Amino acid sequence: MSTLHGASKELQALEDQVQNRTDWKYEMRRDAQEILPGLYVGPFQPSWKREVLQGLGITHILCIAETRESHILKPKFPDEFVYLIQDIRDADDQNLIRIFPQYSKFNHLSSEYQG
């Protein structure tokens, strides 16, 4: 069990549910990382590996990228996974609140599929 410093009891309870927790290492930077039960964060490389996605039980993929990257970040397996692609600039002044309603619906749908 790892302790999240300053975290609420609810967030700590979610943290405690993640199985096989390992300390992050630089070598893991190109892998999908489970941050909450069933919720993974990672770079685009794992999203191009069908067997990795299926092995992790992933059914839905949220892709956040800048417009200039959109040509390489298109859905690779649209018949097998549900995608939500958001155009977000990598900038301090980017308004991320505007994507929360769409992401919330997408996340709820994902939870129904348990993936």
Image: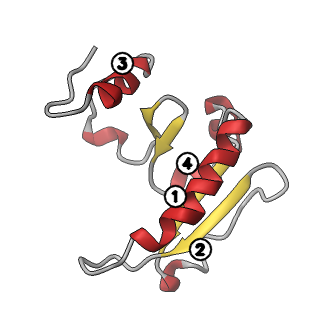
Q: In which quarter of the image is the N terminus?
A: top left
Whether pointer 4 and pointer 3 mark residues with C-beta atoms closer than 8 Å, the reply is: no
Q: Distance between the residues labelled 1 and 2?
A: 9 Å
The residue under label 1 is 44
Q: Which amino acid does label 4 sit on?
A: Pro
Secondary structure beneath label 3: helix
Q: Is residue 9 left or right of residue 60?
A: left
Q: Which amino acid does label 3 sit on?
A: Asp
Query: Residue visible at 63% across and 55% down?
Result: 105
Residue 68 place in picture, x, y as percent: 49, 86
Residue 25 place in picture, x, y as percent: 26, 35
Q: How far apart are marks 3 and 1 (CA)?
A: 27 Å
Quarter of the rendering containing residue 84 = bottom right
* Residue 53 image label: none
Q: In this view, does 39 lie to the left or right of 59?
A: left
Q: What sort of colour scheme is used for the picture?
A: secondary structure
Mark in the foreground, 3 or 1: 3
Q: Above or below — where is 16 with respect to 62? A: above
Residue most extreme to the bottom? 68
Query: Residue visible at 61% across and 68% down?
Result: 85
The residue under label 4 is 46
Q: Distance between the residues labelled 2 and 3?
A: 36 Å
Residue 58 place in picture, x, y as percent: 65, 39
Whether pointer 1 and pointer 2 mark residues with C-beta atoms closer than 8 Å, the reply is: yes
Chain-order first, disc 4 or disc 2: 4
